[in-house]
């Protein structure tokens, strides 16, 4: 059943009371902004509006409006055992799935093509190209009422390239399927549905009685950490309570290494939060003096070594950048993606597309102007005010 | 010569063009705020106004106004050698004095008493009591045109208690003498004048040719760091160019240890700046692999160990606080100081004054409510949003 068919009055009620006058009002207040990538009928919410979250998408159709809810930010357990106990109070077991380190997108079908939205509600040209390549369209034809949520992970990833997932290029790992208005689906139903449709999914790591879950998750996290896998998402099987995330120390430290490499670009809140996690994990895990010392060294090295490398690099006369890579089916995606990144404020240099099988591979150099300039300034004697 | 005598019109010109109408205007705009510690004729600048810096003090007198300039923030060298070269270009030598770890105040005489202002222009009752005890009043009688700048350092220090200076209680270490309007005095003149008046001064560590200064300062810093002394201030002997500061890794790490003990109270900019210094110092000093590893461990331990201690402390059912101590001559200072700290937003518990010689010693417990509450919340399962 397609929820977006029917008369405009019906749709307005279903889709969060959206009406033409409300639409004009939101546009005027800049609570919604038109997509600038060619989808003139797509608008993203720049702020929360009633029940509609920031990052949600409004689609203007001939006969009314449709709202695709944003993906709710998953809250984080800092101290695992008490967080599980308090957050999942009243349910008997939790399901643990892997939290993958990529970037997350929502996918819907629109006018016979799949469209991938980022967390903030932008249409990402690269992710949309990849979704059309990686996902079976039949599912979306059969289920227009659903939005498919997944993590784009692998080396051909312009945001968070990772080689740890045994993926050659990029894979879309489904971790949720919801109704467009945000309504959820129990985990087992979702996994079954996704499997039937041939979707790749995030790994199911187990279902545990709540009482013993913290210990089991700690073992899983220790294991995942060894290969720098990020962590887990812990879910109410019925998906009534919101999921929680918890991450490995190695992943925190990997984030810090990346963050301090570009220390003047990274947000201080981002860096600080990762440091605080280490403190609480160390206490909760009742570490030995030797463990503590090792964690201190790991933390210190995750901060200082990448900074040192960046400084030495700039001292050597180079600028700082990060090389990433994409692989697309449709050559026109390359230009669209470059414009998209530039519009987001990134300073990028695209290499020459290279034909690989039936696809095009392109290297992208993301320039870190802020950290380069700051470092260069200090090397030349600039003071810290 | 007292610059503040003479007719009002003359004073208005001298004292930064201050006039009754200008005064009213500044008061209305809240660019100046009246002191709330009983000095109704003292006003502090909450913002820069023309040539007058934030933190400057305006004194309303019967026949006009007097402005005591704020102490200019001393800029910091991050990479020492190029900073010296660029900042002190054109002079042949620099003077290096110790930068002490206390808190800095400006002292003037007003109505036969010494008054100490904090950096933000508040009259600090404790510092004023101490200034009257520690400083010879004759100097101020003889030189009403001067402001004496010094670091209050030692264990009886409500802000930064330190045992490293061989001081029993608290000492006022003069590091600058300026004219009330901000005019500077050459370093040698100031040291001579202060010595003649019997003032205790910050230590003179040497005068070095600019070309070799970075190496000499590095040796000094390495030496100071061994006893966790903070660092140095590097000055143009003529005091025409502004001074520069540079600190030891051990002092950066001591700041981090204190900062992470109260991680939810400490500013992220404060913590971040100290971490960045470590990266640049490590590169500039051309450290060996072993030095780097040691610095990484020291950094990691300065972050994680105090956090762990705070978490364990709260897990043990305690709140977090910091005990400091003051020693005053005048018993009424105790109440005034408590009101002053409370007005600044601190949560303090004053102990019973104890008579020590002709003075009163009081323990003060500064409660760290924010970090206590945050830690307690996380221990009870609160999530990080």
Image (tube, coloured by chain):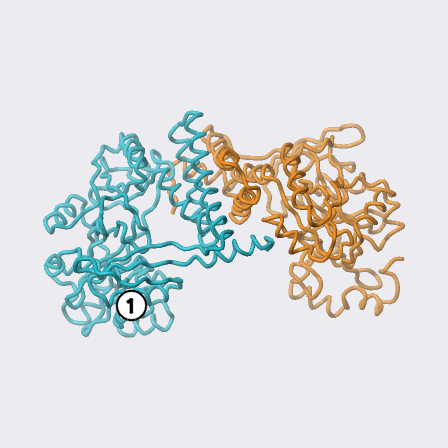
Chain colours: A orange, B cyan
In the image, residue B338 above or below residue B96 = below
Q: Chain of mark 1?
A: B
Q: Position of residue B127 (x, y in %)?
A: 25, 59
Query: With A328 as the anchor, is B68 left or right in this view?
Result: left
- Between residue B274 and residue A220, name the one nearer to us: A220
Q: Describe the element under mark 1 as helix, strand or loop.
A: helix
- In the figure, is residue A285 to the left or right of B74? right
Badge 1 is on which residue?
A: B335
Left or right? Give the position of B272 relative to B227: right
Query: Is B368 placed left or right of A259 in the picture?
Result: left
The quadrant in which the N terminus of chain B is found is bottom left
Q: Position of residue A83 (x, y in %)?
A: 63, 52
Which residue is depicted at the point 45% across and 34% down? B297
User: Image height check: is A155 above or below B101?
Assistant: above
For image coordinates 71% across by 64% down, the residue present is: A51
**Which residue is rendered at x = 63% and y = 48% of the image?**
A343
């Amino acid at each position: 059943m397609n929820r977006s068919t029917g008369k405009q009055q019906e749709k307005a009620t279903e889709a969060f009371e959206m009406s033409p006058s409300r639409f004009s009002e939101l546009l005027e207040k800049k609570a919604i902004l038109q997509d600038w990538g060619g989808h003139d009928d797509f608008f993203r919410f720049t702020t929360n509006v009633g029940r509609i979250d920031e990052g949600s998408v409004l689609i203007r159709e001939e006969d009314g409006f449709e709202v695709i809810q944003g993906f709710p930010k998953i809250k984080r357990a800092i101290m695992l055992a008490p967080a599980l106990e308090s957050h999942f109070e009243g349910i008997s077991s939790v399901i643990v799935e892997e939290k993958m380190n990529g970037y997350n997108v929502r996918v819907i079908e629109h006018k016979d093509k799949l469209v991938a939205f980022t967390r903030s509600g932008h249409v990402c040209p690269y992710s949309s190209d990849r979704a059309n390549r990686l996902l079976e369209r039949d599912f979306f034809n059969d289920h227009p009422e659903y939005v498919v949520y997944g993590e784009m992970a692998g080396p051909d990833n312009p945001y968070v390239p990772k080689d740890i997932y045994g993926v050659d290029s990029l894979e879309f790992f489904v971790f949720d399927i919801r109704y467009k208005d945000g309504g959820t689906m129990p985990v087992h139903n979702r996994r079954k549905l996704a499997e039937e449709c041939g979707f790749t999914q995030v790994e199911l790591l187990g279902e545990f009685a709540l009482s013993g879950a913290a210990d089991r998750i700690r073992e899983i996290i220790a294991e995942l950490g060894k290969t720098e896998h990020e962590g887990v998402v812990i879910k109410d099987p019925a998906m009534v309570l919101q999921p929680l995330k918890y991450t490995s120390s190695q992943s925190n430290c990997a984030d810090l290494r990346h963050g301090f490499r570009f220390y003047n670009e990274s947000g201080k809140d981002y860096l600080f939060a990762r440091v605080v996690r280490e403190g609480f994990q160390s206490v909760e895990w009742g570490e030995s003096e030797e463990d503590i010392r090792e964690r201190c060294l790991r933390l210190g090295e995750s901060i200082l070594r990448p900074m040192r490398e960046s400084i030495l690099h700039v001292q050597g006369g180079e600028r700082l950048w990060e090389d990433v890579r994409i692989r697309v089916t449709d050559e026109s995606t390359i230009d669209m993606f470059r414009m998209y990144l530039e519009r987001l404020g990134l300073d990028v240099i695209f290499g020459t597309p290279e034909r690989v099988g039936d696809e095009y591979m392109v290297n992208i150099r993301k320039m870190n102007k802020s950290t380069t300039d700051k470092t260069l300034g200090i090397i030349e004697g600039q003071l810290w005010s």
